[in-house]
Structure formats: C-alpha cells, structure tokens
Image (cartoon, rainbow, N blue to C red):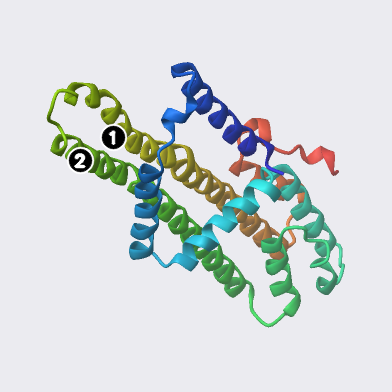
Amino acid sequence: MNIFSITGFLIASVVFFAGLRMASANMLIFLDYPSMFIVLGGTFAATAISFQLDRISLILKIFVSHIIGGRKINYKKIIQNIASVSEAYRTGEAAEQLAQKAEDPFLREGVQLIADGVLDNELIIKILEDRAHNMNYKRSEDAKKIKTLGKYPPAFGMMGTTIGMIVLLANLGGEDAIKMIGPAMGVCLITTLYGVVVANLVFIPIAENLIESCKETHVKNLIILEGVKHILIKSNPVLLIEDLNSFLIPSERMDWREIA
C-alpha cells in the first residue's frame, strides 16, 4: 500500500473540513445540491465530450491500484536483481531459467528475448528501447488527460456562480431585497468552492501523482535496459553495478561489495 499518497489525501481532507468547521459552526451552509450538480454534472459532461469515458475510467483504476497496491520503486533492489541475473548468465546458467529470476516484468521481458535466441543483441536492445519509450509516452499522456480534467470543475463553478447571480439580480426588489443579498451570494459562491475543491483536491493531485509515477517507472526501465545490455555482453558485476548507479543519486546507489 502506498501509505504516503493515502496520508497526503487524508491530510488534505482534514485540512479542508477543519477549515470549513473553523469558518462556521453550521456545516450545512456549505451544502448545496444544485451547485454540486452543476460542478459534477458539468465536469462529467465535458469529460465525455473531450475523452472516451472508458479510457478515463481505466486511468482512474490505474491510479487507485497505484495508491492501494503500489509502492515506491526500490532502485537498489532492481539493480541487485539485474546483477544476480547477469552473474547467473555470465557463469553459464541456461538463459531459459533466467526469466524466473527476473522479478520485474520489464526485466523478465528482456531476459525472455535473450532466452528465445531468435533476435540478435542489437534488435533486442532496439525492441526494449521502443517499449520503454512508448510505455512512458502512453502513461504520460494518460496523466496529462487527468490533469486536463482539472480545468473543468473551476469553470463550471464559475458558471454556477454566474447563474446564481443572474437569479439573484432578477429577484431583487421590494423591502426585503437587501436581506436576501447575503444568503443568496453565499449560495452563489458555494458553486465556485465546489469547483476549486474538486480540481485541487482530486484531479490535479491525481494527475501529479501519476506523472511522478511515470517518471519513476521510466527511470526504472532505463536502468533495466542498460542492465540488459550488460547481461548480453556478460559484463563484470562491478562494472554493471557502477554503471547502473549512474542513474541514481548518491544516497540511493548500491555498493557492489554487498553482493561480492
């Protein structure tokens, strides 16, 4: 479970509701069903026009699976696994058995291509490069779509506020008109509040989380790609580890002596 992301959402929710509670003891004044309908319904309608709904649903499922079952990528463990597979291959272990040692799916694909023995080394690297690039592009584009959705709720919030203002002004008149302005303005502004909340506490954080996840996954795949190159030429494990360490900051790098 990705405890850090879940904690972040919990903190955001607590801060929001605590802010509402400190602003007013009566929380019901922040509840307005027409405003909610305009923001959520309008956002859903705009999304249906902009993107295929099944694709957006798939992206959100990926995010949920990342939040619930995802973990921060352990680059050190990835390098260690690559070194283990490389050393087994270098010392003569059958390539067919190496795929079982590969813990990461992308590394397993690379090792399986080696084990198949159909493609030469250059083609294997070319295929893995294309897969890594295309995977990163596709996931990045999906994350950008979620970020695009963050533009809709504030826009529909302003639309709801405008509608409320029109209704308010159209009904001004009589002796009690002044008394109506305050409560009516409050209802108008609730729509804007809903739009800002949905955008900044839901869509934009989800998009940023997915973008960050895409970056981490791409770095991981680049490390594996470089590792497969070393596996193919049966590099010395020290050279392999030090080369793969080049992708990481000093605090994350692996000491080759740990597996020597």
Q: Position of residue 233 (x, y in %)?
A: 70, 63
Q: Which mark is residue 188?
A: 1
In the displayed structure, 91 sits above or below 121; it is above
Q: CA distance from mark 2 to mark 1?
A: 10 Å
Q: Is residue 45 left or right of residue 56?
A: left
Q: Which mark is residue 167?
A: 2
Q: Residues within 10 Å of mark 1 (few under 14, many from 20)?
A: many
Pick whichever of labels 2 and 1 is earlier in the sequence: 2
Q: Amino acid at mark 2?
A: Val
In the displayed structure, 158 sits above or below 123; it is above
In the displayed structure, 246 sits above or below 45; it is above
Q: Who is closer to the viewer here, 69 or 82?
A: 69
Q: Amino acid at mark 1?
A: Cys
Q: Quadrant of the C terminus?
A: top right
Find residue 89 and report its image quarter: bottom right
Q: Which mark is residue 219?
A: none
Name the element at disc 2.
helix
Q: In the image, what residue occupies the spot 55% across and 70% down?
A: 126
Q: Is residue 151 left or right of residue 103?
A: left
Find residue 94 and report its image quarter: bottom right
Q: In the image, what residue occupies the spot 38% across and 54% down?
A: 41
Marks counted in the figure total 2
Question: Which one is closest to the eye, mark 2 or mark 1?
Answer: 2
Q: In the image, what residue occupies the spot 81% across and 62% down?
A: 90
Q: Residues within 10 Å of mark 2 (few under 14, many from 20)?
A: few
